[in-house]
């Protein structure tokens, strides 16, 4: 049985984060996010043609509509990694981004932070809170940058005068990677605002002014700065199509955040005497996360940073050290168990090496072969895959790049649910083919409609065409 000195000597936190990266990578191989496909398609076009996604040209519903390219750079990075090593390399890259964000959170504590077993436990707890978000998504860049900005804010607290300028410079790449850059801008505003209140020197606001300018270094200019503000505070009801913007259900997925909130309360982080209100920052993201689960990873990073600072130089007996390590191991086992259950549930879809296995590849290829150029209707969740697979040869109806489609969403919902008036809508959009899950409301409606016929069924998707439409390809 190890003594307290031996327990402290092992780099338990590094081990926890290495295992976390491996678990997250395994999960990303099992579960492929639908948005990754259109990022790969658009990113490849940026790399090969130097063409930024400023105009929609994959759909027939919004062709030619201007777009805000909030994620053009992250798409290019994804495409470059995919080109180098396929989807496994992309999964590993995203897992490392998340692990790096957690690693940076531990840097906030510094060398005088909590003892190593407690560090490992807090890192495992924050990693557990990321489980629901461990997918290959461009928002992982924002998680990394947010953790980096927390670290820079801590360095600023310790007297590093260059830290606000680093935050200002970091906004230039961040604004081109993901709309979450606005969080960094707000953190920078808080740091510079506190400096100004303490010193009453206008020059204290200079990094914030530089950072604001950096936010305009984007192909869409100032529009890219305004768009995330509108999206967060005044986006239309269609935002509910994005699962991560829905409230968190109080069930098993909420347990990591309950544990984090309990750890934060136990640490008494509200008693911290520091220039950054760490506990308040975590609490704000918890409140935001209850409204939109997308905010919960930021709560995890903020709560982990605050709790670790509050427990700085905490004394641990050998027994409590072992208890912390046992807790970290239990959290890693719980993470692995959830991922193993998902892997078993998805096993019938095909081997993990096939990153398209969840999507209607066979039916999509048939639609492209038989009906090139025809107007295809399909579920929203398949839109990104169809952009990747067959567009623009077969134009899509809607996809996860919701910027061009906000006003289209009510009509989409009426069609996909086969609600009264769907036939008139299908006629007004001149829909010629449809790719639908078997047994879905619209699939049943088209199967019973004399003007439509099923021309293919691969078990995952049914391809419908208007009866008068003749195949023009293949």
Image (spheres, grey):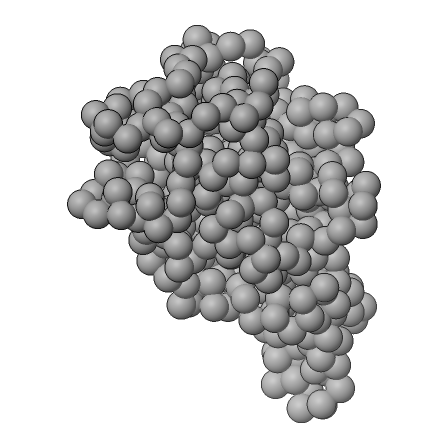
Left or right of 211 in this view: 341: left
Location of residue 443 (image quadrant): top left
Question: In which quadrant will I find the N terminus?
Answer: top right
Q: Count of labels shown? A: 0
Q: Nearer the viewer, residue 455 or 407?
A: 455
Which residue is drawn at the image coordinates 41% and 36% (left, top)? Answer: 432
Residue 257, image x, y percentages: 39, 42
The answer to whether residue 326 is visible is no
Q: From the top left corner, tell me how far across and down residue 154 is, in percent.
A: 66, 60
Q: Residue at x 67, y 25 (%)?
A: 87
Q: Position of residue 37 (x, y in %)?
A: 59, 34
Give the camera-side residue of 447 and 170: 447
Q: Position of residue 21 (x, y in %)?
A: 63, 28
Identify whether 227 is placed above or below 240: below
Question: Which residue corresponds to the image point at 81% horizontal and 50% vertical from the top-left?
Answer: 50
| Placement of the C terminus among the 4 image quadrants | top right
**Residue shown at 66% from the left, 37% from the top:** 40
Left-right relation of 414 to 183: left
Residue 74 visible in rendering = yes
Q: Is residue 52 positioned above or below 187 on the image?
A: above
Q: Which of these two is toward me, 459 or 182? A: 459
Above/below status of 220 relative to 373:
below
Q: Residue furthest left?
A: 420
């Amino acid at each position: 049985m190890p003594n307290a000195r031996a327990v402290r000597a092992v780099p338990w936190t590094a081990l926890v984060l290495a295992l976390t990266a491996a678990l997250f990578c395994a999960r990303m191989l099992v579960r492929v996010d639908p948005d990754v496909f259109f990022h790969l398609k658009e990113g490849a076009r940026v790399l090969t043609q130097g063409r930024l996604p400023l105009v929609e040209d994959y759909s027939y519903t919004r062709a030619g509509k201007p777009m805000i390219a909030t994620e053009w750079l992250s798409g290019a990075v994804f495409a470059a990694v995919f080109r180098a090593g396929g989807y496994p390399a992309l999964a590993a890259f995203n897992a490392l981004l998340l692990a790096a964000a957690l690693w940076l959170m531990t840097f906030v504590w510094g060398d005088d932070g909590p003892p190593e077993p407690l560090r490992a436990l807090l890192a495992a707890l924050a990693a557990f809170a990321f489980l629901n978000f461990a997918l290959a998504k461009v928002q992982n860049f924002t998680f990394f940058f947010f953790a980096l900005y927390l670290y820079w804010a801590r360095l600023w607290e310790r007297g590093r005068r260059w830290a606000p300028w680093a935050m200002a410079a970091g906004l230039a790449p961040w604004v081109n990677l993901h709309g979450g850059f606005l969080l960094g801008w707000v953190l920078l505003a808080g740091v510079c605002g506190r400096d100004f209140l303490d010193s009453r020197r206008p020059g204290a606001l200079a990094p914030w002014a530089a950072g604001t300018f950096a936010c305009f270094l984007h192909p869409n200019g100032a529009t890219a700065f305004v768009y995330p503000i509108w999206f967060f505070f005044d986006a239309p009801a269609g935002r509910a199509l994005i699962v991560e913007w829905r409230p968190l259900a109080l069930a098993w997925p909420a347990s990591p955040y309950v544990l984090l909130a309990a750890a934060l309360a136990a640490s008494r982080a509200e008693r911290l005497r520091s220039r950054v209100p760490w506990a308040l920052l975590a609490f704000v993201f918890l409140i935001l996360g209850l409204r939109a689960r997308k905010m919960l990873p930021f709560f995890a990073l903020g709560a982990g940073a605050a709790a670790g600072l509050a427990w700085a130089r905490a004394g641990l007996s050998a027994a409590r050290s072992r208890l912390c390590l046992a807790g970290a191991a239990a959290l890693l086992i719980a993470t692995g168990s959830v991922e193993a259950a998902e892997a078993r549930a998805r096993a019938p879809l095909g081997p993990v090496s096939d990153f398209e296995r969840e999507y209607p590849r066979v039916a999509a290829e048939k639609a492209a072969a038989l009906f090139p150029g025809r107007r295809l209707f399909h579920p929203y969740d398949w839109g990104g895959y169809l952009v990747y697979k067959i567009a623009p040869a077969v134009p899509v109806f809607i996809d996860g790049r919701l910027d061009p489609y906000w006003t289209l969403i009510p009509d989409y919902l009426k069609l996909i649910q086969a609600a009264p008036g769907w036939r008139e809508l299908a006629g007004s959009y001149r829909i010629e083919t449809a790719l639908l899950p078997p047994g879905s409301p619209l699939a049943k409606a088209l199967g019973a409609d004399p003007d439509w016929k099923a021309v293919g069924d691969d078990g995952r998707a049914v391809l419908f065409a208007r009866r008068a439409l003749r195949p023009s390809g293949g």
